[in-house]
Image (spheres, rainbow, N blue to C red):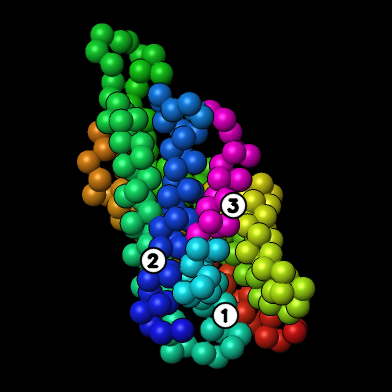
Amino acid sequence: MSNGDIFVGEVIGTAILILFGAGVCAAVTLRHSKARASGWVVIAFGWGFGVLAGAYTAAPLSGGQLNPAVTIGIAVDTGKWGKVWVYLLGEMVGAMLGAVLAYLVYLAQFQANVRKEGTSGDPDDEPLPTLGIFSTIPEIRNPVANLITEIIATMALVLPILAFGLTKGLGESGTTVLIVSLLVVGIGLSLGGPTGYAINPARDLGPRIVHTFLPIPNKGTSDWGYSWIPVVGPLIGGALAGLVYHAAF
């Protein structure tokens, strides 16, 4: 694969992933959305379908990694680091592009994020903080616990992805991406409660940067004090998964 193919593939695939993922979060969160308050299961499946669409689209060009933690895990296992920077750049650009596209889809709902005139304390009339649509926020802010959660959840993603490569039937049938998509749904349902399961540095950092600059009324903080955890945790988890896989398999 050429550097150009890898970059384009990762940009397009990651943009689709974030469009679906941020899109489902917006659908569930924002007022005047038909899917509002439809719940965590909907969010988990929305992200899983995002992986499905993004990875299958990118696969012919780049292999559809879409995640720096996966890229690092593969590099640690194989020892091939030469194209890692191209993957990481494409993933970051794609994540930012996908966040902008999700914002445009829900533009009217974001613009309606204002306090209604003449209201007095009704929660439904107050502006909504919007960072959770774009990036992760922990339920309990404990840096050590949050970091451990992201490390373990990312290992639960990357280690099976590496092992799937040994399963000949999956590769021949073309269903590897489908299985990975279901894996992401499972991680969201089982391990996503504490931190919102970033498990992907580009998925969290790219949209957080976009959130900082988007003209969303009353959007609230971008929480840069927490932002290092969903970057460092998945990178550590991806590297550890690569080491475990290399040693065990």
Does 87 lie within the magenta span? no
Q: Is residue 232 visible?
A: no
Can you identify the residue that label 1 sits on? 74
Can you identify the residue that label 2 sits on? 11
Can you identify the residue that label 3 sits on? 48
Q: Position of residue 143 (x, y in %)?
A: 50, 56
- Name the residue nearer the viewer: 36 or 195: 36
Q: Residues within 10 Å of mark 2 (few under 14, many from 20)?
A: many
Q: Quadrant of residue 199?
A: bottom right
Specify which label sits upstream in the sequence, 1 or 2. 2
Q: Position of residue 2 (x, y in %)?
A: 41, 84
**Horizontal relation, residue 17 to residue 4: left or right:** right
Q: In which quadrant will I find the C terminus?
A: bottom right
Q: Residues within 10 Å of mark 1 (few under 14, many from 20)?
A: many
- What is the CA distance from the residue labelled 1 to the residue labelled 2? 19 Å
What amino acid does circle 2 point to?
Val
SS assignment at label 2: helix
Does 51 lie within the magenta span? yes
